[in-house]
Amino acid sequence: MQQVTLYSDGSSRGNPGPGGYGTILQYKDSKGELHELELTEGFPETTNNRMELMGVIAGLEALNKPCAVTVITDSQYVVKAFNENWIDGWLRTNWKKGTVKNIDLWERLLKAKEPHTVTFEWVKGHAGHPENERCDKLATKSADSVM
């Protein structure tokens, strides 16, 4: 199974307000050569949490075969949902209707995640992590482009 690292960040200028996500997919081919794909998109009216989710979704949806994916993000919202089993609880209680936000994107993320083996790692934002900083620049540039 192909090993892929998915770096992602989301941004919004206001909450809600214009926003964007930035995602970098990286993998090494059989010769050890690194390949990268950058993904980014802006939205005129959104929230930071929605953009954090969209970054991961866009990265997973870009993969055309099952992969072993390590998602690295500064979003505790995304990481804790999986690593602290929030998702399992939300599914058991039918999304705690009325209390869980962004259900549409959580459902889309679960669907995008299905064919892959996915792990989630948190990295501190704005702390000099090169790919996280690049994702932040992509996200904020996309947010600014729709203002």
Image (tube, grey):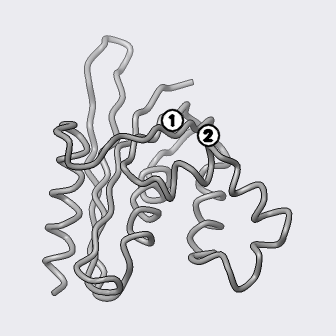
Judge the density around disc 1: few (<14), some (14-19), many (≥20) Cα neighbours within 10 Å: many
Q: Which part of the image, by quadrant, shows the N terminus? A: top right
> In the figure, residue 22 lies in which quadrant?
bottom left
What is the tally of numbered marks visible in this picture?
2
The tag on residue 97 is none
Q: Hey, which residue is sitting farthest top in the picture?
A: 31
Task: Give the image quarter of residue 16.
Answer: bottom left
Comparing 123 with 68, the one in front is 123
Q: Position of residue 89 (x, y in %)?
A: 78, 59
User: In the image, what residue type sits under mark 2?
Assistant: His
Residue at position x 35%, y 43% in the image: 7
Q: Do residues under tags 2 and 1 come within 8 Å of each other at their CB atoms? A: yes
Residue 69 numbered mark, or none: 1
Q: Quadrant of the C terminus?
A: bottom left
Above or below for 12 versus 115: below
Circle 1: residue type: Val
Residue at 46% x, 53% y: name it: 76
User: Which residue lies most toward the right here?
Assistant: 92
Q: Identify the residue at horizontal 49%, vertical 50% (top origin).
A: 60
**Residue that label 2 marks:** 116
Provide the secondary structure element on which disc 1 rests: strand
Going from the N terminus, do you reach mark 2 or mark 1 first? 1
Badge 2 local density, few (<14 within 10 Å), some, or many (20+)?
some
Measure the C-alpha gap from mark 2 to mark 1.
7 Å
Q: Is residue 27 above or below residue 9?
A: above
**Residue 61: x %, y % from top left:** 49, 55
Question: Residue 100: x and y, percent?
Answer: 65, 75
Q: Is residue 7 left or right of residue 132?
A: right
Residue 116, quarter of picture: top right
